[in-house]
Amino acid sequence: KAKEKVHWVCSNCGYSAGQWWGVCRSCGEAGTMKEFHETKGSDNKVSGFAVMDGAVGSWLPHQEETQLRPLRLAEVNRGLDQLHWRIPLNGPCGNEVSRVLGGGLVPGSLTLVGGDPGVGKSTLLLQIAAMITEECNDSEASPVVYVSGEESVEQIGNRADRLGITEDIYLYSSNDIEDILKKVQYLSPRALVIDSIQTVYLKGIMGSPGGIMQVKECTSTLLRFAKTTNIPVLLIGHVTKSGDIAGPRVLEHIVDVVLYMEVGTLMYLSFVGEKYSTHRMLRAVKNRFGSTDELGVFEMSHSGLQAVSNASEMFLSEQHLDSEILAGLAVAVIMDGSRTFLIEIQALCLSGSTGSRQVNGIHANRADMIISVLIKQAGLRLQENAVFLNVVSGLTLTETAGDLAIAAAICSSFLEVPIPNDIAFIGEIGLGGELRMVPRMEKRVYTVAKLGYRMCIVPKTAEKTLGNEGLEKMTLVGCRNLKEVIYTVF
Ligand code: TYD
Ligand code: MG
């Protein structure tokens, strides 16, 4: 049997490649690459992209990689002129996601969306699938495929109904990666969603789905698939108790973009209680195509996620309605990996009592030090007070960046003056009562500004280096020491 050479030709612009692409690399049209057979021996000019095709290899691990060789820079660039083209996501919700992604979905990228079970990952991804489909209202255009290893197509259909999705999304329920990719490649979709990485497996790899080997190999296979076909793949990953996706952090190294979806209750927890548990935050923890500073805020409604584009204003007005703010509360800004959290510190000073201290979520030594510094350097008569400290939501504060909020909460309770709930505190306290810089200052400050705070108290040096530009409606107030903080806030 004579060996056939297969070409893929774009029916829109005539661009020809040695392999199939989901989106034509010349004209950007999706689903236009059609198979074309050619018997060996005929005129077989190598196109400018043929070298590139070899370099990306095949997506299944047991298939042989072909014609690998180092490329000259000029050669590489020629093939990458589509690099700046992104799949736009429209509508308020789409804009919010788009911004977090760095301006749209990059063709051929692998994006991991992580979050606790039930946070709304499947909802978000189904909505994204609809937004991408909506983008091309041409019936000839390739579809978006949503594959679930967790739910039946009927269940996904029900969710789509609830979300009011009418777009023509393709649904598939399977756990076998090889099966999924073969079916999907046949459809040559605009984008592929896999829900979730913990439920898919690759034949011939040890372990059950969700295991470290399976998760790693499946992700690598999906990455190869994305790079080979130029189809963007969106991958859902459940975060385990320890805070990692599927246990191994290795996953984050494999993929191009890592987004985390979180419930927005950590902020204002005791001010407004459950009210804000409908808020969801989406942030990039890693992004090969953009910044990781973007934060998307959504609200989970009865019909899916709605963008909250004016998060700042909304938080502020809601707060002002909330007339009674208790003394002894202060907001700290802490980092967990590359994620920023706002947590509330509560203090209760009881006068006329022995100087006993009860702390929860703060290291006792650190609390003792801060109390001593407040006595000595700020003149607070805490010796005659019992001091109780608590970190809301059961987190344990391990960073010294929370020092200032702890001190502020204690002052507030001692002076019986509430701190307005649109002020946040960042800073380490030294034995002289001086405020010191902490790592990732810029990132912390940005998050606070983004969440609509009016004021952020930081060490003087931080104010000098960061300035007040790009901080929305927030003012950065630099203080040298605890005394200055007290004059500023109380
Ligand atoms: P889901 O997307 O299934 O979460 P995940 O995939 O991260 O596990 O969403 C879970 C919750 O969202 C569920 O408790 C119901 C709620 N929800 C709404 O409030 N509104 C909606 O429109 C939808 C689809 C879900
Ligand atoms: Mg789900």
Image: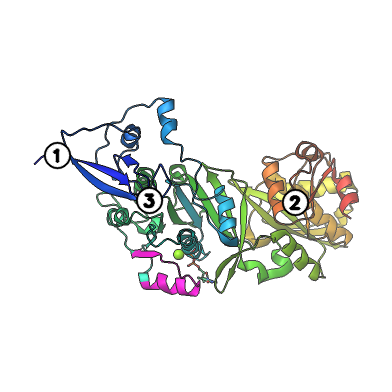
Q: Residue drawn at (38%, 43%), measured in percent from left and top? A: 227
Q: Amino acid at mark 2?
A: Glu
The quarter holding residue 302 reads: bottom right
Alpha-carbon neighbours of circle 1 within 10 Å: few (<14), some, or many (≥20)? few
Residue 141 lies left or right of residue 387; in this view the side is: left
Q: Is residue 104 above or below residue 19?
A: below
Mark 2 in CB contact with mark 1 (< 8 angstroms)? no
**How was the colour assigned to the protein in this rendering?**
rainbow
Q: Secondary structure at mark 2?
A: loop
Residue 339 lies left or right of residue 203; in this view the side is: right
Q: Is 156 contained in the magenta span?
A: yes
Residue 22 is situated, as x and y percent measured from the top left of the image, at 37, 49
Q: Residue drawn at (82%, 70%), measured in percent from left and top? A: 324
Q: Is 428 contained in the magenta span?
A: no
Q: Residue drawn at (67%, 49%), measured in percent from left and top? A: 334
Q: Earlier in the sequence, mark 2 or mark 1?
A: 1
Q: Earlier in the sequence, mark 1 or mark 3?
A: 1
Please identify the quadrant where the C terminus is shown. bottom right
Task: Give the residue at mark 1.
Answer: 3
Residue 458 is situated, as x and y percent measured from the top left of the image, at 78, 45
The quarter holding residue 376 reads: top right
Task: Give the residue at mark 3.
Answer: 215
Question: Does the rendering let one see residue 363?
Answer: no
Q: Amino acid at mark 1?
A: Lys
Q: CA distance from mark 1 to mark 3?
A: 37 Å
Q: Who is closer to the viewer here, 105 or 197?
A: 105
Q: Who is closer to the viewer here, 50 or 278?
A: 50
Q: Residue drawn at (42%, 60%), measured in percent from left and top? A: 138
Task: Give the residue at mark 2.
Answer: 472
